[in-house]
Amino acid sequence: MYKIDLKNKFWQWIVLIFLAFIWGSSFILMKKGLRSYSHDQVAAFRIFISFLAFLPFGIKNIKKINKENIYSLLVVGFIGSTIPAFLFIKAQTQVDSALAGVLNSLTPLFTLIIGLIFYKSTAKIINAIGIFLGLTGALGLIINTTSGTDFFSSINYYGLFIVLATICYGINVNQVKYKIKGLTGLELTSLAFMLVGPFAGAYLLFTDFSFALSTNDYILNLAYIAVLAVIGTVLALAIFNTLIQYTSALFGSSVTYVIPIFAIMWGLFDGEKLSYIQFLWIGFIIIGVYFVNTRKQK
């Protein structure tokens, strides 16, 4: 049996692709949750269920919270998870998955910019080339999977919520990479949710579920939200925060370039076809991610 070694580039790529698969599937789960629940309820359920799943690990490691790391844990909990959850699902009420996926690809760009300005990180030209190659591939891939001329007309101000979410992700990635020491990915994520989970639970206590209860599949749609929380948040964030401790902030955030590929794969199960030009854009994405990781940040 092979042991996962995140110091090995092979395993770094395997984990990156696995994360992209999980998060690439999150769009469908969000939409199913929105069939019965409001965007605020979906986001709050996602955070609160994640908090419950992390609770055993959080209680076990609660003594590791101290004055040196509590600020960083609050950043990870609120800016890295809670705020983007509300922003992203709010945007999903008016923005299609294609546009959401392409805007999500801004994360590595903001990771680079925020790291250079606020975290004194350094980057090589080849990293910047990789970012723009990946973004170009993501843009081309999404545009070529949108029929007609409705793609650009569907751009609206709700897309700014996703842009704000990617800025939050950029802050979170840099905070984990450069400011948090002595905690594993599972420890820091579980402790962060210990701090933010009760707020989500308090919100749910005072929200109105009358519309949700009037829908036929509210239990099933709640189950989709639970899967989104446990797999798309708990498992994925624990793995992601561990990955960027072993790699660079840019490489970790470049998972957003691969997410659109899996979004398209889900479409194939529904009878959609993949053209040769789309394989070209996928190539751009893979080359871009490779360039991002060719020379690591100092």
Image (cartoon, rainbow, N blue to C red):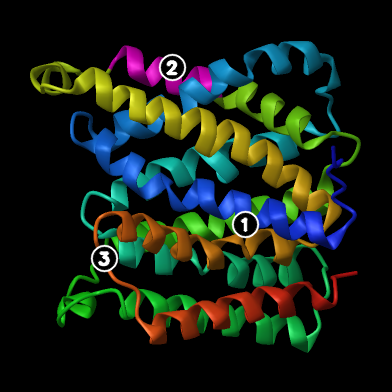
**Disc on the earlier residue, 1 or 2:** 1
Query: Along the horizontal axis of the image, is 157 left or right of 295?
Result: left
Instruction: Judge the density around disc 3: few (<14), some (14-19), many (≥20) Cα neighbours within 10 Å.
Output: few
What is the x, y in percent for residue 95? 25, 59
Mark 1 → mark 2, Cα distance in angstroms: 32 Å
Q: Which residue is drawn at 69% across and 32% down?
A: 189
> For the residue marked with disc 3, what is the amino acid?
Glu
Is there a contact, CB below 8 Å, between mark 2 and mark 3? no
Q: Where is residue 77 in the image (x, y as percent from the top left)?
A: 61, 35
Return the mark for residue 253. none
Which residue is the site of mark 1? 17
Most common secondary structure along the magenta stretch: helix
Picture disc at residue 201: 2
* Label ID, residue 272: 3
Q: Reply yes or no: does residue 63 show up in magenta.
A: no
Residue at left offset 61%, top offset 40% = 236
In this view, the mark in front (1 or 2): 1
Label 2: which secondary element: helix
Q: Position of residue 114 (x, y in %)?
A: 67, 66
Q: In which quarter of the image is residue 173?
A: bottom right
Figure check: 260 above or below 94: below
* CB-based contact (under 8 Å), mark 1 and mark 2: no
Q: Distance between the residues labelled 2 and 3?
A: 39 Å
Whole-Å distance between the Cαs marked 3 and 1?
22 Å
Q: Which of 67 and 78 is in front in this view?
A: 78
Q: Residue at x 77, y 16 (%)?
A: 62
Residue appearing at x 42%, y 67% in the figure? 103
Looking at this view, is 84 or 60 the one in front?
Answer: 60
Label 1 residue SS: helix
